[in-house]
Structure formats: structure tokens, C-alpha cells
Amino acid sequence: SVKLEDEEMKGRIIGKEGRNIQALQRATGVDIMVDDTPGMIILSSFDPVRREIARVALEMLLKGGRVHPGRIEEVVEKAQKQVQKDVTRAGEDAAREVGIVGVPKEILQYLGELKFRTSYGQNVLKHGTEMAHMAGVLAEQLGANVKTTKYAALIHDMGKALTHKIEGKHHHITGEIARKYGVAEDVAHA
């Protein structure tokens, strides 16, 4: 949801005959509801990255004040670039935090997308880094390969970034994607 400073902005977001809101929905692929909650605009999509792009774009539009279809396309494009930078940085930061190097950029992309996803109320990317730290400690105590264990734990929920695009259970999707991008079989299997 995006909070509005005043109700007058709802009218600008909707636009004449709904042109602005339709342009925003088309450009982002997100459903936008303006009449349900006073002082709020609700964004709805199964794709959390698209939802974030819509949120960033909407906040840019509200801050700028000018809202029309041409400006919407321009702002959505800026929002896409900004969110993509956030996704890339989040994936890289997660791998660096747990000490895993040489992760394919496609895997880092999927990891970064988990920044915008929650499961049982917990951020999925944060959960992955926490599991990697704990798995590393356990692996060390058991005499297992720490790097393999941390890598597997870090990406164990990666498939959740794709469950809205690919049919199947997230852990099976994770294994398939890991194999596709050349991750070692012991990590992909785990």
C-alpha cells in the first residue's frame, strides 16, 4: 500500500476517465485499487518485484505532482532501473555476507528478488542468509564441507522467486535453476 498525503491526489492518479490509472496498470502489470481504503492506494500482484516497481513509480509520481500517461511511462522506466539495482545489490550483498564467491549473476538476480518476498512473515532473503550462517556452523561442527553447505542453505528458497512464473514446488525449482546455471551438483541436489 502507498499512503496519500491528501485525497486530491487520488483524482490525479485516476486521471480523466481513468486514463492515468490504466496507463500505470499497463506499464507495471500491477492491479491498483484506489477506492478501498481512505488515504491509501493498494497495489496487488503475485509478482513482488513488479509490485515494488509500481510502489516506487507511484511514490515518484506523487512526489512530482505531475501525472499523465507520458510521464507515467517515463517514471515506471526509472523505477524499473532503480529496483533492478536494488535486486542486484541485495543478491550480491547476501552472497558476500555469507562468504560465497563465484555465484552466477542469474542466481544472484533470483536471490536479490527474494528481498521483496516474505514467507510466514519473514523476509525470504534474510531467512536464506540466516540459514546459511547456521548451516555453516553445523557443517563445521560435523566436519562437512562448509562452503557447499552455506551455498545450498543460501539458495534453498531461491525457487520462491519463481513460483508465480514456473509450475512446481519451490525446492524443485531451486534445484533446476541451480543446475541450469552451472552450480555444483552437490549444492543443487541439497
Image (tube, rainbow, N blue to C red):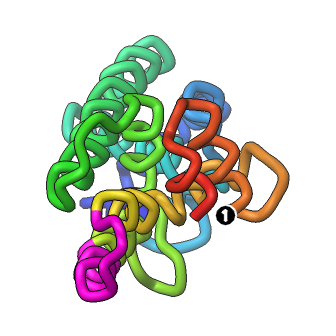
Mark 1 nearby-residue class (10 Å; few <14, some 14–19, many ≥20): some
Camera sees residue 59? yes
Name the residue that disc number 1 marks.
171
Residue 64 location, quadrant: top left
Residue 1 location, quadrant: bottom left
Name the residue: 52% across, 64% down: 156
- In this view, the residue in front, 3 or 5, is 3
Q: Main secondary structure of the magenta part?
A: helix
**Residue 3 in magenta?**
no
Quarter of the image for the C terminus: give it: bottom right
Camera sees residue 32? no
Residue 142 lies, in percent from the top left, at: 33, 86
What amino acid does circle 1 point to?
Answer: His
The magenta span reads 133-146
Name the residue: 42% across, 68% down: 153
Is the residue 176 above or below the residue 44 in the image?
above
- In this view, the residue in front, 43 or 104, is 104
Name the residue: 65% across, 52% down: 175
Is the residue 92 above or below the residue 32 in the image?
above
